[in-house]
Image (tube, rainbow, N blue to C red):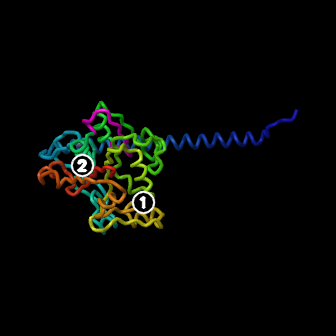
Amino acid sequence: MECRYNISAVQQFSSSAVQQSLHLSLSSSKNLIRRCLGAVKRRLVRYSRIASDFSRKRDKYCIICGHKVGRFYPYGVSDEIFTRHHIIGGGRRENCICPYCGNVDRNRWQYYVIKNFTGLTTEAGISVLHFAPEPSNSELIKSNPNCTYITADIVPGRADYSADMTNLHQFRDGEFDYVIANHVLEHIQDEAKAFSELKRVLKPNGKLIISFPICTDILTYEDASITTEEGRLKAFGQEDHVRLYGTDFKEHLENYGFDVKVYRPEGELSPEAIEKYALIKDDVMMVCSVRE
Ligand SMILES: [Zn+2]
């Protein structure tokens, strides 16, 4: 009887499969070790910040974790694009990271707006889709017991659904009362398709809660011919950004069929409160309704 298998090929395949499997196993072990070391380092940094905070006069306050804070810690880089343009929430900020919970300034403003200017924590029977969910905002929204809360992210494994904002086939028309997308749209080339999908999955009276980096000295700028990481870093300040939103950001969203309410710390809080909570005074969060 004819042998149906080429033994040498099977052995080669087996050997190559074993090698691949060993390689994958070594590679995943290295990744695991790297992640563990990263987590240990982050924890050590946080503990040392907390320890040094006890020696200070704690006259600041983190609105997310509720700790009195002596000093929020610096964060961010000052590269060419942040030097050329003033980008709200971009570049290096001196009062940024909470030593206790690790949240940054813009997380605190998102948290404040969600808590005080939306019904996300109080309305009963609502459904929410949250893209690239910030842990602090997730916990806040999940404190509403009458809420169906779903998370999504383009990267598999990071959220309930792996979802591309330009093709939300997993979700029905009018499925959500709220969609939240902070610092996502600056990564998406086909912005028109993304907004069309966001409008489709929102209920007629639903709300889109959104923010992105905004330049205070130019109009919204993009150039689809810039496709390399190097080119995008130079033009938009980050390797995976595809546009810079500018001073026309509100009109930009209105042109996609939204009514836009803009919330800034300087419009809602006293200078003393902005200082105490370590917020960016001209930070922007928008709550948008689909225009009839
Ligand atoms: Zn905190």
Q: Nearer the viewer, mark 2 or mark 1?
A: 2
For the residues bearing labels 2 and 1, Cβ distance under 8 angstroms: no
Question: Is any part of residue 41 visible from this angle?
Answer: no
Residue on which the image places disc 2: 109
Q: Secondary structure at mark 2?
A: helix
x, y percent for residue 188: 43, 56
Front-lying residue, 80 or 269: 269
Question: Is any part of residue 20 visible from this angle?
Answer: yes
Quadrant containing ligand 1 reads top left
x, y percent for residue 176: 37, 41
Q: Residues within 10 Å of mark 1 (few under 14, many from 20)?
A: some
Q: Main secondary structure of the magenta part?
A: loop
x, y percent for residue 120: 28, 39
Q: Which mark is residue 239?
A: 1
Can you name the residue that lies furthest to the front here?
292
Q: Residues within 10 Å of mark 2 (few under 14, many from 20)?
A: many
Q: Secondary structure at mark 1?
A: loop
Q: CA distance from mark 2 to mark 1?
A: 25 Å
Q: Vertical placement of 19 versus 86: above or below?
A: above
Residue name at image x 42 percent, y 64 percent: 232
Q: Which residues are magenta?
A: 120-134
Q: Quadrant of the N terminus?
A: top right
Residue name at image x 24 percent, y 35 percent: 122
Can you name the residue that lies furthest to the top here?
145
Q: Vertical placement of 137 versus 85: above or below?
A: above
Q: Does the magenta-highlighted stretch encompass residue 126?
A: yes
